[in-house]
Image: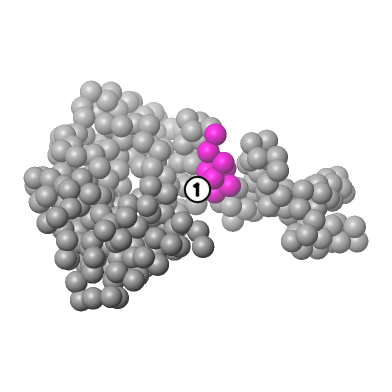
């Protein structure tokens, strides 16, 4: 039995042994989950099962830091399990505990107007439809006006009472599908912390949720111009290019991941699949080579490479 399984068993025993569960097993288990950063959707049910009784019976005996961390843990788990009311309750309690009142973000009016009119990570305006548009005098005049507005916006910053709570508030708005409000909050946060990778990724997620693949691609490429070592972002970009049948661009993204992770046979398979989709004798030969390399790395549980090798040899 692993350490986390032992802690979970102890917490379960404490939860079922009496009407008022013992504090320590629940607290230790939830603290261990936070240390391992196990805040994904697969752990949301477990988190809620133990965190809610801990807060219900022992919130007053927890240290302020531990109570706030546990409430944030419940908030994230509630969002993952689509329990919006519970998430709103925990965010309200967090604000009260820390002494913050709404609004958490105050944006100057002129900056708010500019944020509303832009789509990018750094507030530059661009078209999120098909690339390119015909240059006209009207467009040139519009560009000049945007340049003036951009320079004015650069000199202004929003007032944020708590960056962490503002981020949680934006997550809540996003979960409620209030994308306009969430986007405005994320952009305001980026004006204060422009290298906040989590916020950049949330903007990309919103573009995907709104079924705007071209906008998501633009945001991802700009994100990768700063965070160049993010393999997950390259894989996400490859998926977006695949969805638009831009296989050569998807192949480029997968090549970047192969360079960073030369022993990841799953990426070799995806790259070979992409080459196979592109067609042509040269690409088929290359796809066969990468399926063979994938099998060399993992030969036991790699049926995808076996089938790919069979297909490329026919």
Category of crowding for the residue at label 1, using alpha-carbon neighbours closer than 10 angstroms: few (below 14), some (14–19), many (at least 20): some
Viewer-side residue, 38 vs 99: 38
Q: Is residue 12 magenta?
A: no
Residue 259: x and y in percent read 68, 35
Side (left or right) of 67 relative to 311? left
Q: Is residue 84 above or below residue 299?
A: below
Residue 257: x and y in percent read 63, 40
Protein image colouring: one colour
Q: Is residue 38 above or below residue 228?
A: below
**Does residue 115 appear in this view?**
no
Which segment did they paint magenta?
229-236
The residue carrying mark 1 is: 214
Quarter occupied by residue 144: top left
Residue 58: x and y in percent read 17, 61
Q: Is residue 232 magenta?
A: yes
Side (left or right) of 194 relative to 299? left
Side (left or right) of 178 relative to 284? left
Q: Helix, strand, or loop for circle 1?
A: helix
Viewer-side residue, 154 vs 96: 96
Residue shown at the point (36%, 65%) measured from the top left: 10
Residue shown at the point (10%, 51%) measured from the top left: 96
């Amino acid at each position: 039995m692993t350490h986390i399984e032992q802690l979970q068993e102890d917490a379960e025993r404490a939860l079922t042994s009496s009407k008022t569960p013992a504090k320590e097993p629940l607290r230790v288990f939830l603290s261990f989950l936070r240390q391992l950063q196990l805040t994904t959707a697969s752990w949301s049910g477990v988190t809620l099962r133990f965190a809610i009784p801990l807060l219900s019976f022992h919130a007053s005996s927890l240290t302020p830091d531990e109570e706030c961390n546990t409430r944030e843990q419940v908030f994230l788990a509630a969002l993952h399990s689509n329990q919006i009311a519970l998430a709103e309750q925990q965010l309200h309690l967090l604000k009260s505990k820390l002494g913050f009142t709404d609004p958490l973000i105050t944006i100057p009016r002129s900056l708010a107007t500019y944020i509303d009119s832009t789509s990018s990570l750094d507030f530059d305006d661009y078209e999120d439809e098909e690339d390119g548009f015909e240059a006209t005098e009207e467009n040139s005049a519009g560009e000049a006006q945007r340049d003036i507005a951009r320079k004015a916006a650069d000199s202004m910053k929003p007032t944020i009472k708590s960056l962490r709570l503002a981020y949680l508030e934006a997550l809540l708005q996003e979960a409620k599908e209030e994308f306009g409000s969430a986007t405005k909050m994320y952009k305001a946060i980026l004006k204060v912390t422009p290298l906040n990778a989590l916020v950049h990724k949330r903007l990309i997620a919103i573009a995907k949720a709104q079924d705007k693949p071209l906008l998501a691609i633009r945001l991802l490429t700009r994100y990768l111009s700063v965070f160049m070592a993010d393999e997950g972002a390259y894989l996400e970009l490859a998926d977006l290019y695949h969805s638009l049948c831009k296989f050569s661009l998807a192949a480029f993204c997968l090549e970047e991941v192969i360079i960073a992770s030369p022993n990841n046979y799953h990426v070799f398979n995806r790259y070979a699949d992409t080459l196979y989709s592109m067609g042509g004798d040269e690409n088929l030969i290359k796809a066969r080579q990468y399926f063979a390399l994938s099998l060399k790395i993992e030969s036991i549980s790699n049926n995808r490479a076996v089938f790919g090798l069979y297909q490329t040899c026919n």
